[in-house]
Image (cartoon, coloured by chain):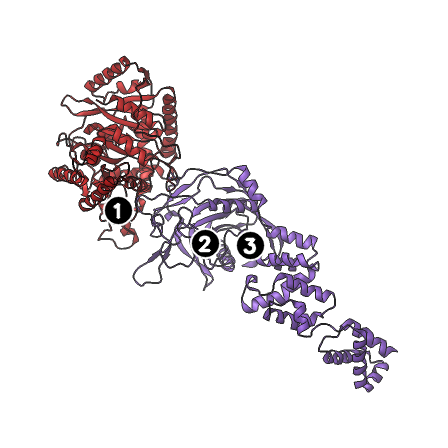
Chain colours: A red, B purple
Amino acid sequence: MREIREALLREDYSLTDLVKHYQSKIAERSHLAAFREVFTDDSLERASEVQSKIKAGTAGKLAGMVLAIKDNICYRDHEVGAASKILEGFISPYHATIVERLLAEDVIIIGRTSCDEFAMGSSNENSAYGPVLNPLDEALVPGGSSGGSAAAVAAGMCLASLGSDTGGSIRQPASFCGLVGLKPTYGRVSRYGLLAYASSMDQIGPFASKSEDAALLLEVMAGKDSKDNTSSNHRVDEYSEEGKARTYELAYYKEIVEHPGLDPQLKADFLAQLEILRSQGHKVEELSFPYLNDLVPTYNVLSNAEASSNLSRYDGIRYGYRSENAGDIDTTYTKSRSEGFGPEVKRRIMLGTFVLSSGYYDAYYSKAQKVRRLIRDATINALSDCDFILSPTTPHSAFKIGDIQDPVQMYLEDIFTVQANLAGVPSVSIPKFKSASGMPIGLQITAGPFEEKKMLQFARSLED
Amino acid sequence: MEHLLKGKYEAVIGLEVHAQLITASKAFSSDKNEYGSSPNSNVSEISLGLPGTLPQFNGSVLGHAIKLGIACGCEIRHENRFDRKNYFYADLPKGYQITQDKGPICTGGKIHLKTSLGEKVVNLTRIHMEEDSGKSIHDQDPYNSLVDLNRAGVPLLEIVSEPDIRTGEEAYQYLTEVRKLVRYLEICDGNMEEGSMRCDANISVRLKDAPEYGRRVEVKNMNSIRNVQRAIEYEVGRHIELIEKGEEIKRETRSFDAIKGTTFGMRSKEMDNDYRFFPEPDLLPVLVNAEDIDRMKSRMPALPNELYAKYTKELGLSEYDAGVIIDSKEIALYFEDMIEHTKNYKAAANWLSGDVKSHLNKYGIDIAHFPIRSKWMAELITMIDEDKISYSLAAQKLFPAMIGEPKTSPFKLAVKLNLIQESDELALMELVDEALAAFPEKVEEYKNGKKGLIGLFMGEIMKKSKGKADPKKTNALLQEKLEA
């Protein structure tokens, strides 16, 4: 971003040239299916507007930033569809709060990216519009659910992008695509205008090649929003400020390095990385986290419960898809929803409905809430004794499209990432490791609530 | 049926009242809360439940709930959470209603009422905050149901009573009291016809003194307090009849048909939704601290029961007069203003429950549209008390004139209309002499014992004076003259 800004000021090229460059990249590799829609004309229009602001010296902080947004973030007068058939043709009449804030700083939104339908998935194979391919190896998944956003940045189709992270949906694709992917503290970024999946965990966050760019985006997006009651009025720091070199107290979980699903090569690389950090003067401590195997089930019960309610509004009555076979009100619901939602979304709605049903509520929802509290307390506790918890972001590198058929196995892909969502703490994945075949894997850094500045400065210090 | 009920059976009734709150905006958005706007005009993306929207809590809803809680003597919850009640309907845009399931803002409390059998206390179970749904209209288009979402998100308080009510009359009085209360507090206009106050009744019948309740039926769609009473009376009769015949009462929801005065089954309870309540993740708990409650307590307006006690005990008004005055807050306030200017409370009450009320009824207006200011009504009373005008002239001439000319004080008006009572003895004597001179033989008859003739002389004097002669003084002078 810094280089681009300087180049624009030197007039090495114009913002229009830059947008056109990205557009041609998108067109060249359209088979990756990273984008649901490219805002071809209006991104060029915005480019010339922002260009003249740069000339006049009135441009905002993000002038020069060409951004893609996940297809679950509302951009006024543009379609938004969560990669679902049920929202086909729906145009948002309002801006998400973060879109408003980003536009005010002269960001250019180049298009909306594909994702797993309603952000439900870990491979981007659940899009109603087909899977997204990993630009680094097209036989592989880019990760999910924000796979399109990750692929777009990795393929050089934009400088940065936005995703949403409910159980790892930013960090996991960042790990698979070799990017920085940031999930902020719950409440750090307004959710107003983000199509809800699991309200108590959803957070919008950036993808970028450099943590400095991710930090800059967070700086603009973060802060209290009167339209989101759960947004925090905690002070917004200058996240993009480069910190002074210093040493930290780091921790990792024994259960994670001993996890049978962890790739042995990755395990060795991770432990070697810890040694490097030790040698740099950081303190590294091993901790125990007894709830590792409870994370995914707890997450599933709670996220599905919330999703079953959040997705009730897609009913074929007021907007979006209505079945041609709809007759009375009941068939309008049943047929529109049966035809409009994909199989994974339906599975989660049914599971969520089940765990909230009378007679099962206590055994599932209520119990999961209690376990969540234990997980949160244990996480916050651990983070009050150290600066960061480190782990590989994912147990392995990107897998082949179509390889994971069992949904339960797919859910376990989130095992290292969901903890931050259940605990509400910030977490970032930075590219650090490589698989035997050379595919990237991320290092995940998790910090205490609202410690994004420190976390991003540490991430920046680890960048090559 | 009535005799059966009195002897053998007992009805057990609990009421759920939904009161739409008077607020500028909706419960969870800044959309206008306004009755009667053109359909679907008070609807932003939030009321429409568009993708990505979130609720924003309107603090004035909390204030209204606390006021009602204080007025009913409820315990008020300090940490208020919201829950989602999930069900599908065309007028429910989000597919769930935001309500308070597990933790209502108010618990306990009571409503005092009077029935023909005496006083009664109905306990409250709870009062909670929630949002209204939109409105489905099934009878305006022959092919489609229409949906108006102006009402979607309008704040409601649901007031749930214990099953303490035994008769339709008690239900009538209970609702009258609740309506009076919300109107006094200015939190709801209490208009059942427009639906700003709605009531569902849970009714069961059991053998008198039986330990268990009978099977419960819920009755809906009663759009006036009177209809709630009618529906309950019908439904109780129906239950007794079924029990007497040895038939089973089905657990169901029934609807009241106001034209026939009967109820009919809508759906069985088995068909009811599983609402899958769970905590609303989009809203943080709303906190109420003890100071908030104390501050609101100190700002509470006088409540009808307090005024009633003051009027009957301190001011010596009859229960009837006190009842008429507290019936509406506006009349009570008018009365309060009047008695700032006159200590003749009884007369003030009489004027209000008599001439003023007849005038309001005649024109179908409320006291807010009554033209005479309270201070001048008090002055009118003082003029009568000071014998400046007779009561009958005041009622028949001056009061109507004041209504016609509300900008002139009653004294000026009485002078202008020449209504000031003649109490000057010389002038009255002259009138007495004239009257007696006109009927010499009647004077003779009077003297022979026909004392009733005094009325004839009085009448003549009143006619001559156009009613202005001070009746007391005239009477005394007449007697004096005739007995001499």
Does the CB distance between marks 2 and 1 fall below 8 Å?
no
Residue A408, disc: none
Q: CA distance from mark 3 to mark 2?
A: 23 Å
Q: Amino acid at mark 2?
A: Val
Q: The residue under label 1 is which amino acid type?
A: Arg
Instruction: Report the front residue among A34 and A410.
Output: A34
Reply above or below: B442 against A450.
below
Residue A15 position by quadrant: top left
Disc 1 is placed on an element classified as helix
Foreground mark, 2 or 1, reads: 1
Q: Secondary structure at mark 3?
A: helix
Instruction: Pick the quarter of the image with the C terminus of chain A.
Output: top left
Question: Which quarter of the image is occupied by the N terminus of chain A?
Answer: top left
Tag 3 residue: B180
**What is the CA distance from the residue labelled 1 to the residue labelled 3?**
46 Å
Q: Amino acid at mark 3?
A: Lys
Residue ranking furthest to the bottom = B441
Q: Badge 3 local density, few (<14 within 10 Å), some, or many (20+)?
A: many
Which circle marks residue B219 in the picture? 2
Q: In which quadrant of the rendered view does residue A327 lie?
A: bottom left
